[in-house]
Image: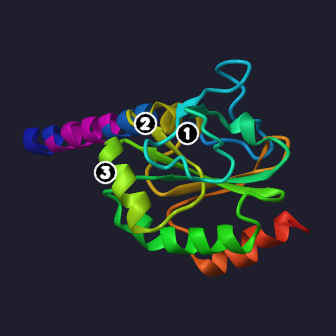
Amino acid sequence: MGYRSISVLVLAAAFVGLLGWGLSQSSPTALEIGEQIGDEQEPGGPALPVLDGTERAVGVDGAEELSLPDFRGQWVLVNVWASWCVPCEEEAPELERFYRHNGGGEGKFQIVGIDTKDAVSDGREFVEEFDLTYPQLHDGGGTFADDVLKATGVPESYLLDPDGALVTYVRGPVDARYLRTEIQPLLGGS
């Protein structure tokens, strides 16, 4: 084997090694089914500001900040989104229809939107454009999505049981079929 072949092999091995190391450093550990969400950082769970201009949502009641434990006692579908995300635009109307059909926060089910890595004004415009009525929280820097939910992008959705334990999650957009066949049966009589 010549010098050139050895050099190519060494460079290829170094590239693969660096790529593997980079992926291991940037990939968050996935959440475990059954894991409690929101209680790790502080006793009441990490609070996020209500997205300015979206206080009309059921369950917000004039609060400036909310945390996931504030919704205990209800099934909660946490949807992480951003205004610049095209798949988020596609799933938003489906989420709103599902929310309205399943009690709209009046019963045992709630959707909580988390606008992440986004400007408040852009998030507010998104909520107005899609006439979203479920509570919207703002995670401008993405710390909550990245560190607590271990999100890898947007959109992502997490279903929490009434005790705040993770039941299921999906990375990527949800559609009406998924909500009807995978989420609705878990809600029982909500």
Mark 1 vs mark 3, foreground winner is: 3
Q: Residue at x 47, y 57 (%)?
A: 155
Q: Note whether residue 47 is visible.
A: yes
Disc number for residue 122: 3
Q: Secondary structure at mark 2?
A: loop
Q: Secondary structure at mark 1?
A: loop
Q: Secondary structure at mark 3?
A: helix
| Principal secondary structure, stretch drawn in magenta | helix
The amino acid sitting under disc 1 is: Lys
Q: Residue at x 31, y 46 (%)?
A: 121
The amino acid sitting under disc 2 is: Gly
Image quarter (top left, top right, bottom left or bottom right) of the C terminus: bottom right
Q: Quadrant of residue 75?
A: bottom right
Magenta span of residues: 8-18
Q: Note whether residue 118 is visible.
A: no
Compared to residue 133, the image places residue 122 above or below, namely: above
Q: Nearer the viewer, residue 109 or 2?
A: 109
Image spot of residue 81 (x, y percent): 46, 54
N-term-proximal mark, 1 vs 3: 3
Disc number for residue 142: 2
Task: Based on the picture, tell me whether residue 11 belongs to the magenta stretch.
Answer: yes
N-term-proximal mark, 2 vs 1: 2
